[in-house]
Amino acid sequence: MNVRSRRVGIESIDGKKTKSEFTERFEKLSDDEKCACLIALCESILPKLAGLGGAKFASDVLEKCRQWLESKNVEADYLYSLLESENDICVFQFLNDEKDSEKENVLQCLSTALAYIILLAYRFENQVYLPEPIECVDSETVEYLFCHFQKLCPNSNLLEKLLPSENKN
């Protein structure tokens, strides 16, 4: 396949979307490894939210995700309420209100990671019916997160560390 770049968000020369190497590696992980990877990515960029009113909330969201990863005692519906809620504070609310592009990219990463973790939580609970935004979560969602992460940290090798190539010794 003739591809312009190995980086995230790539297209082949003929214009067809292809999965990045990182997304392909991510898909091979167990659900717990996927969750841990997403949490680690978000934790690495969380300091970029300094000064934002939602920085503490974002940290608390990641703590709830970590709690779900470690003990599976946080319900998927509760995690979903952290992403989207009409009555309470949620990630989407901070994302919609944010004007700073860097902070917006951080919140995009957080919301995308949270959506994927929510999907994993619903699967763990054997839920058949999912909230509409979660029904759409798939490998393109992860590709989107990796793209925003690389916009924030273009020189970071964290993706390579979290998703090492199988060829490496």
Image (tube, rainbow, N blue to C red):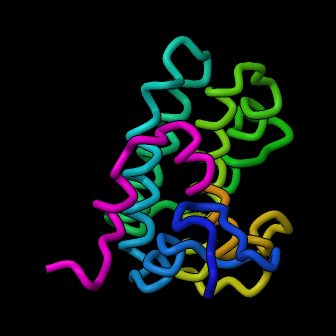
Asked if residue 32 lies in the magenta stretch, the reply is: no
| Residue at x-position 82% and y-position 36% | 87
The span shown in magenta is 146-169
The relative height of residue 137 versus residue 88 in the rendered view (above or below) is below
Camera sees residue 76 = no
Determine which quarter of the picture holds residue 160: bottom left
Q: Choose between 92 and 168: the one closer to the eye.
A: 168
The relative height of residue 152 versus residue 149 in the rendered view (above or below) is above
The spot of residue 147 in percent (x, y) is: 61, 53
In the rendered view of the protein, which quadrant contains the C terminus?
Answer: bottom left
Single out the residue that lies furthest toward the top: 51
The spot of residue 115 in percent (x, y) is: 65, 60
Determine which quarter of the picture holds residue 159: bottom left
The relative height of residue 70 versus residue 82 in the rendered view (above or below) is below
| Residue at x-position 82% and y-position 32% | 96
| Residue at x-position 48% and y-position 41% | 154
| Residue at x-position 62% and y-position 47% | 148
